[in-house]
Amino acid sequence: MYPVWQVPVMGSALVIAFIASFHILPSHLATSAFWFNVYVEDKAYKEDRPELLEFIKKYVLVILIFSFIFGSLSGVGIWYAVTVSNPKGISALIHNYVWGWASEWVFFIIEILAIYIYYYTLGRVDDRTHLTIGLIYAIGSWISMVIITGIISFMLSPGKWLRTGGFFDGFFNPTYLPQLLMRTSFMFAIAGLYAIVVAGTLKNREVASFIVRRASVWGMAGAVLAALFFKLYLWSLPDTAKELYGMSVLVGTVPDIAVAAFIALFVWFIVVWIRPQLARLVPGVLAILILLAGIFSAESVRERIRKPYVIDHYMYSNQIIPNDMVAKGVQGEMGTIDREGILHYSYFVPEGLRTIDDADLLRSGRIIAQIECSACHTLESNGWLRPLPAMMEKAGLVTVDDTQAFIGFLDSFPFMPQFAGTAAEKRALAAYLVSIRPHPAGAPAGRATIGKIHR
């Protein structure tokens, strides 16, 4: 667990959050857009309206460029970021769901082949064949979502897997179906939004108005259904996650941004349905940016309610496995770490720092903070992600003794893991945290408090 991928100021978790939030746009567009595409294309053939195919060409090109270039790059970015920030968590997912991911890749390859064939055969094959190619893509991409959602939702609510270790017991977990329904509905809202943006670039305003009106109906329907299934999703959450969600709502800000973005998006759909001529490129892009802010805040809440775990009740966010997992033959690490020390347990800690002594107390404490705290906190005063100096100040912790005592009952908070390590390591961590705590101007940082270690 050491060395740790510690991103200054931002924190590794925020790097993942930024990449993952952006990735939702191209991935959900790739999953949903062809349902709308096939609908419009079918209408063009049945009603003999070849002018609608101008939209089809532009919309598919947007999907190709945005979803299959930027979406693919951000997907690789997620894999890199999560692997270097939490290798044990990714290892656990791969060991349990490698065949799930392999199956998803089969459908991903079908998507890639289908969209290129669809794009380059438009107008070159008969209508029914071309629509069939579009349906193959649409169904294949949705099945890809069906598989990925099982793995993502497993991390929040493993369900019976904690007892059985079974593939399907973890895959079809308590939050799986509500999340799948919510994501499926939401993807239609995203498809509608992007269709409106593309329609705003069309020269034929009659076609543009037709597309905007139909896409706004898809968007409104998708948004309403997503909101309803979100309620079902909340109901299906584990009790601890419900408690943490309630705390997030009380704190506000992040959930408020998601709600505001949802309302703004819904209002935009209504406005362009009434006045399709308002659907232009600039306001459309602005609507996408508002949606991105809402996705980021919603994903932040989803990560918050999973704390202190990366896999609920199996592995903490700092990669420590607290309890035995009998079904998988995995032994809990907490007892060993408490007995031997986290500095001994972590393979790559420099030899000279494995044993706590006064000379290297703060250096040892910093390493412990990096191992046990940096998955959820930044160590700098100007850090973006729950900076530890600010947390110390907010908690009113000034002395090493008080800080050490506070660390001892961290797990009394539902979002915090228990400290893992020896009493000496706990004191080293406390000393380090006191040393980075903000001090009044002119006061020597930590001198009055750290000196108490030697009394």
Image (tube, rainbow, N blue to C red):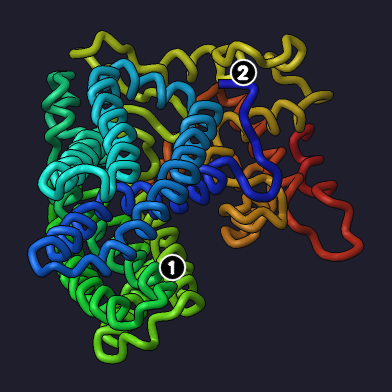
Mark 1 sits on what residue?
Answer: 288
Image quadrant holding the N terminus, namely top right
Q: Secondary structure at mark 2?
A: helix
- Choose between 86 and 36: the one closer to the eye: 36
Answer with mark 1 or mark 2, whichever residue precedes in sequence: 1
Which amino acid type corresponds to the residue marked 2 in the rendered image?
Leu
Q: In this image, 153 relative to 256: left or right? A: left
Dot 1, crowdedness within 10 Å: few (<14), some or many (≥20)?
some
> Which residue is farthest right?
442
- Choose between 47 and 420: the one closer to the eye: 47
- Choose between 294 and 442: the one closer to the eye: 294
Q: Secondary structure at mark 1?
A: helix
Image quadrant holding the C terminus, namely top right
At horizontal 46% and vertical 52% (from top left) the residue drawn is 22
Which amino acid type corresponds to the residue marked 1 in the rendered image?
Ile
Residue 352: x and y, percent? 77, 12
At horizontal 24% and vertical 36% (from top left) the residue drawn is 144
Dividing the picture into quarters, in which one does residue 261 lie? bottom left
Tell me how many marks there are: 2
Res. 369 visible in picture: yes
Distance from disc 1 to disc 2, alpha carbons, whole Å, reads 46 Å
Residue 319: x and y, percent? 45, 27
Res. 154 visible in picture: no
Would you place residue 242 above or below residue 337 in this image? below
At horizontal 47% and vertical 75% (from top left) the residue drawn is 281
Residue 414: x and y, percent? 35, 48
Mark 2 sits on what residue?
Answer: 343
> Which residue is farthest bottom?
275
Q: In this image, 119 relative to 231: left or right? A: right
